[in-house]
Amino acid sequence: MSLLQKLVESYDHMADKYAGLYIDTMREPLAPISHTLQNAQIEITINNEGEFVEAALISKKEGRTLIPVTLKSANRTIKKSPHPFAEQLEFLSGFDTDLQESYLGQLKDWDESAYGNKFTHAVYMYVAKNCIIHDLYAAKILESESKADMDKKKLQSTVYKKCLVRWKIKDVLTNEVTDTWKSKEMFQSFISYYNAIITKESKIGLCMITGKNVPLTNLHAKNIYPLQSGAKLISSNDKQEFTFRGTFVKDSEDFLTVGYEASQKAHNMLRWLLNNFGLIIGNKMYLYWCPQGKYVPSPFEDITNDEDIISDKEVLFHSIFQLDIKGLTEKDDVIIASFESLTTGRVALTYYTEVPANDFVRKIKNWRESFVPSGTSWRPSLYTITRYAYGMERNGKIDITDGNYTKHLEELLQCELFDEPFSISLKNILVTKASYPKKYKSLKNRRYLTYIAALVTRKYINDKAGKEVYTMILDVDNNDINYLMGRLLAVYEKAELDTYTAEELKCRIPNAVRYQTMYAQRPAATLIVLQRKIVPYLNKLKRRKYNLYMKYQNLFHEIYEKMDGRDTELNTKLNDAYILGYYHQKESFYQKEEKPEQIAI
């Protein structure tokens, strides 16, 4: 219920600014109450006296159309309940007289009510002439005006009879043309008209969303979830197998009563948010927003900010909610939610949390700064961390097939939202994978993995200690044996690499990388192997690059001197600090040789 309440609150805050408004940066507009969005294929212009002017095909890009709907027409399946205004050709053509009469009868009631207008009157007069198919054929929109072809021929993959028509009305005196699907006058006309009907015909009762006695409904909007057509958040027909009702057995109103207006606001708002700002990961959609309509930093920037996932959510929110973070008050909050559709026609809320906006901003800032220090070249996204922790390399890319990866992603999102430490299992799996570099043919992937493992390990150790034990810069004063062994491994690797030709760099793997797995498990024995294998490469450097030779000899001397007399400490496998020493030493080599964005990744 909290979700629905926040959606209603969001609608109340943002409707005046966004309801019915087509914005170029959005996929679709926020639907006003008693309206929905459908794809129109045909646009007909008539004048306000009900005379045909012209017709045009609508491109798929321009087809999203706001149309008035009743409860029955919005939920129609087999039953043919007409939409009040924009409608499919089968209701307008006259080939099925029952459908046309039901459409015209409903439109006439609206037109003759206190809420009718020149637009409803013009369309009523035109459709009543029963000439729409002939006019569309004459305008070369349809290739045939035969009834038999209504089920056969298609426009934009839609059979003729299912093509939705939207209306433009031209004033005969001023020549002004009104797009009725964008007209605030039309929106308010139908809202007022249908509200009068709902108030008269619906049962009055307690709305569990608003706490008010209002007209109720048990029919709720569908098509709110972009990943599945027709999906509903609240079902109106799950009388068997779907919902456990406990002792409430009379009918659906025993366990949930929702007001019509609240239902419209909540579902229209959710659809707008999901379609414009929802982030798709696997078969789930993630969403965040401030119900007060204010800008807040995106937690999803950290889900997808790398080159493998394209996301413009942060930019879009900047353009929509032009408010500074300083404009947030103690009363403002942020909603984080995820949705999934596992059953046809149903969408489920799988994650939900409310966070005070100021805490939200502060915790995200603190977490990001403690994860990646300022000046560090690249912050991996939460999705990237998840991929490298639970994925495998395929064709040069890290591909994740773990069916639980959305669960892992949510766990990371929780860490960021609530400024919590990484789990020990995540840290362990990244360090373990980084210790198996031979499983990764791509040098880029090996570098990314080492970098991510070092970042996660650093934050885990620092959080556990409650202070900054490690930075992301080489600490030459750190005498921890594991850290020193990591540094030593990096020196062995770089000393060998510096003897390679350009061609060898593309295909050869240095011994330090080959033996890294053994090195982490049996450091003392493996170190002897590396000492022996580095000799020919040091000799090459001595002959060809004497300055480099002396550089590495000095580094070996410095590190071995710190390890002198500590051989017994190398009889057990290395702990996580080794990956930090390894990364830090490597980074110190590259930062002087490469551009900042290339460092260690």
Image (spheres, rainbow, N blue to C red):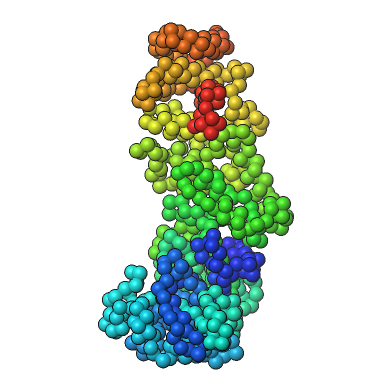
How far across and down, in percent of the image, does residue 286 sit? 51, 54
* Residue at position x 54%, y 53% in the image: 313
Q: Nearer the viewer, residue 231 or 33?
A: 33
On-image quarter of the N terminus: bottom right
Above-or-below relation of 364 to 279 = above
- Front-most of residues 152 and 531: 152
In the image, taking residue 480 as reference, residue 348 lies left or right, namely: left
The residue located at (62%, 50%) in the rendering is 297
Horizontal side, residue 478 vs residue 546: left or right: right
Residue 216 visible somewhere in the drawing:
no
Q: Which residue does the image show at 35% across and 25% down from the upper left?
A: 507
Residue 87 image point, x, y percent: 43, 80
Q: Give the image quarter of residue 503.
A: top left
Vertical position of residue 269 compared to residue 152: above or below: above
**Residue 349 x %, y %:** 51, 59
Q: Where is residue 353 in the image (x, y as percent from the top left)?
A: 59, 54
Can residue 398 be seen?
A: yes
The residue positioned 65% from the left and 41% from the top of the image is 366
The number of numbered badges drawn on the structure is 0
Look at the picture and state if 148 lies above or below 351: below
Using the rendered view, name the quadrant where residue 479 is placed: top right
Q: Which of 150 and 279 is in front in this view?
A: 150
* Snapshot quadrant of residue 5: bottom right
